[in-house]
Image (cartoon, rainbow, N blue to C red):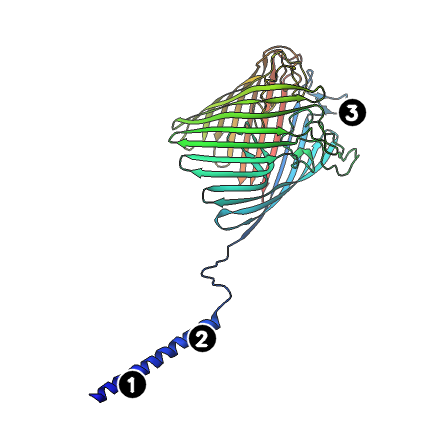
Amino acid sequence: MKKYGLLVLIICFVVQIHSNTVELESALTDILNKSEFNYDILKRQNVVFNIGSYLSSRSNFLVGENSLYYSTTGTYPFELAPNRQWESINSATIWGSMVFEEGNFIKLAINGTFLFGYESVLPVFNLSELYISWKYSLGRIVIGRTLFALNSQLNFSGTLDGIGLEINAPFINFKSFVGFTGFTGVFHPYYNNFNISAYDKSFFEQTNLTNLVMVVQLNGVQSRRIFLSTDFDIHYLFFNVNPYFLMQLDISNIDVPNFKNTDYIFNTFTIGLLNKIRIWTPLYFYFDVSGVFGVMQDIANVKTVPISAFGLNTELRYTFTPRSNTAFSICYATGSGTPLEENKIDSLRTSTEKNQNYVYYGKFNGGYVLDPVLYNIHSIGLKFISNINSFLSGYIYGFQTFKMYSESPVSDSKADINDYIVGTEIDAGLSFKFTEGVNLSIDAGVFIPETAYTDKTPRLKAGIALNVAL
């Protein structure tokens, strides 16, 4: 019995020695192979570098003045009439981005453009984009220079140096941004989207290569405005309700070297409501109404004029096919004007009692030829759009424009008669998509001035644009 007990002890001792030896060898292996970081816990982010370019060329001309479309008695043997209403814009953009995991990225874009016009060649360049876009659990934050916009792009859309925040939740999205315009056109005011008042537009060009005065003209006169917005999008089933708020502060009267507005400044806030309703599958209704309030300051005469204005933009669209290849729309838009306003050209100056001209900071399409600013007008539009196939699409638009107050001006200074009927316009265009990155479009339109004009010569405008993404 003692012999069996001794045998068991010897076996246990041998097993224990073997076990300790294995553990020691394993520990030595871990020590020898140990790295500075544990890559199972600390993983490297994948970074993707993208680079690309975008080339575009757009040219158009406008003719029709005093019953003439061309002239052979001018400076040159053949001239369009009017001879200054043609231009060619040719630009190249180079961009690069660093894309991190989950779609977070940093983007840089540089743009160079040649502007050709009547007896003018103007080179301009700009840092067009430089921003970081980062996602978090509830949305996204954007910091830097990029395009900011409300859902109501009529009331605001343009490039700012700013900060944007998006928050997404079930049934409701929220976005807000704050930004400044005064640095976007440092290299040239051509890149500042918000040249609205007479002071904003007072920049004097000196870099025309055909009559050179200055080789590089930096930091010219331009809009200097601060924008702050909040924008809600409440969506449920077949409708979207989008209340929004926009505040604009004009600081162009601050005394800085070479910049001081001593004329008029205006500070505004906009309150609006945009509704998008799918009435039934092919029928869609868009309704955007906004009020603009604030003050206009006459700096020279130390006067303050209250601003109270409104704008309305609507569209009823019917799609003929389930894939939205063809659609027909009825549109109506209006912007308030100031009654009994003096006919001052290209300015927001009004009577000393109240300014009722609708002021917005986005985009409005009221005709390719007339291209009206949405104040003191009613614009009725009919639109037909068709994506014929993957290669070809086209459109036909018709517009009828009226004044709100016959004695007050509209944005076209040639409308010199106090009458309500501004004119009729018909536009048409084709777009050819050769590849994913190559697109050619052709646009043409005719505007027929009516009883608000002394010169009733129909105006013709045509243009062509080529875009290439590499």
Residue sitting nearer the eye, 409 or 164: 164
Of the residues tagged 2 and 3, which is closer to the observer? 2
Task: Answer whether residue 252 is visible to the viewer in this image.
Answer: yes
Please give the count of numbered marks on the rendered protein: 3
Q: Are marks 2 and 1 in contact (CB under 8 Å)?
A: no
Farthest front residue in view: 2
Rounded to the nearest angstrom, the CA distance separating label 2 from label 3 is 94 Å
For the point 50% across and 67% down, the residue is 35
Vertical placement of 92 versus 37: above or below?
A: above
- The kind of residue on which mark 3 rests is Thr
For the point 65% across and 37% down, the residue is 184
Label 1 sits on residue: 10
Rendered location of residue 25, percent (x, y): 41, 77
Mark toward the start of the polypeptide (2 vs 1): 1
Local crowd at mark 1 within 10 Å, few (<14), some, or many (≥20)?
A: few
- The kind of residue on which mark 2 rests is Leu
Local crowd at mark 3 within 10 Å, few (<14), some, or many (≥20)?
A: few
Residue sitting nearer the eye, 184 or 70: 184
- In the picture, the quarter occupied by the N terminus is bottom left
Which structural element holds mark 1? helix
Mark toward the start of the polypeptide (3 vs 1): 1
Q: Are marks 2 and 3 in contact (CB under 8 Å)?
A: no
Which structural element holds mark 2? helix
Label 2 sits on residue: 28
Task: Answer whether residue 436 is visible to the viewer in this image.
Answer: no
Rendered location of residue 301, percent (x, y): 71, 19
Residue sitting nearer the eye, 436 or 141: 141
Of the residues tagged 2 and 1, which is closer to the observer? 1
Mark toward the start of the polypeptide (2 vs 3): 2
Image mark for residue 75: 3
User: Image quarter for residue 80?
Assistant: top right
